[in-house]
Image (spheres, helix red, strand yellow):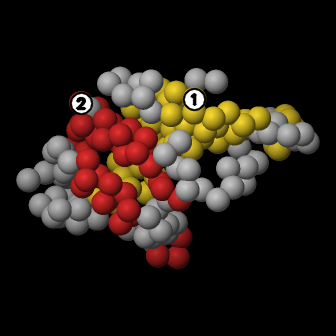
Amino acid sequence: MAYDRRYSREEIHQMLCLSERRPRPTAPPAKAHAGHAISQHTEQRDDPFDRRHIRRDSTFASRKDLVLAVEEALHSDAGQAELATLDAHAVQSCKIAFQLGATQGRIHADVVLNPMAKVGKKQVPAQGPAQYLRNVPVNSVVLIIDKLAPAESWAPLHFQTAYPKDVDH
């Protein structure tokens, strides 16, 4: 069995949960950031305004939206092609950037638009309140996935992150 297969919605949810706060398996232990798809990119995030250093920060409106987006991205032709690269011995991770189709309009995100100022060539946080938009439709998602176990295992993937990329606002 290979990594490019159909995963049930329950398997996806379980792998997301198991990946949460687990250090990234493909990074050196001293620099391995913990998986954070649920804690940083869903409604379970403590403070949606805590990342003022980026212009736009999006979180899925619910864990269900996260799971549905990941499911569609994994099962797409592009997702299956990226997962197939994990079958190579030297390849340890992949990135799937996917434009939603079947679930577009059904998956929503909350978006924080931070005020930014250009200093030289760099964007930096500026004074003023952030704009907060709730339940805006998500158009695309990004997933970063690492091999964790042999493809035959029931949970072979580590989801480092999964976040809404393109949203309507």
**Residue underneath mark 2:** 77
Is 99 above or below relative to 1?
Answer: above
For the residue carrying disc 1, how many other residues have a C-alpha within 10 Å: few (<14), some (14-19), or many (20+)? some
**Residue 140 in sight from this viewpoint:** no
Q: Residue furthest left?
A: 1
For the residue carrying disc 2, how many other residues have a C-alpha within 10 Å: few (<14), some (14-19), or many (20+)? few
Residue 7 % position (x, y)? 20, 48
How many numbered discs?
2
The residue depicted at 50 percent of the width and 30 percent of the height is 138
Q: Nearer the viewer, mark 1 or mark 2?
A: 1
Q: Secondary structure at mark 2?
A: helix
Residue 17 % position (x, y)? 38, 62
The residue depicted at 53 percent of the width and 42 percent of the height is 61
The residue depicted at 72 percent of the width and 37 percent of the height is 132
Q: Residue furthest bottom?
A: 30
Q: Nearer the viewer, residue 98 or 41?
A: 41
**Residue 45 in sight from this viewpoint:** yes
Q: Nearer the viewer, residue 144 or 65?
A: 65
Q: Quadrant of the C terminus?
A: top right
Asked where in the image residue 19 lies, by quadrant, the reply is bottom left
Badges 1 and 2: C-beta atoms under 8 Å apart?
A: no
Residue 71 % position (x, y)? 30, 41
The residue depicted at 58 percent of the width and 23 percent of the height is 168
Asked where in the image residue 65 lies, by quadrant, the reply is top left
Is 27 above or below relative to 168?
Answer: below
**Residue underneath mark 1:** 136
Disc on res. 29: none
Residue type pointed to by label 1:
Val
Distance from the alpha carbon under mark 1 to that under mark 2 = 26 Å
Residue type pointed to by label 2:
Asp
On screen, residue 40 versus residue 6, left or right, reads right
Residue 87 % position (x, y)? 18, 52
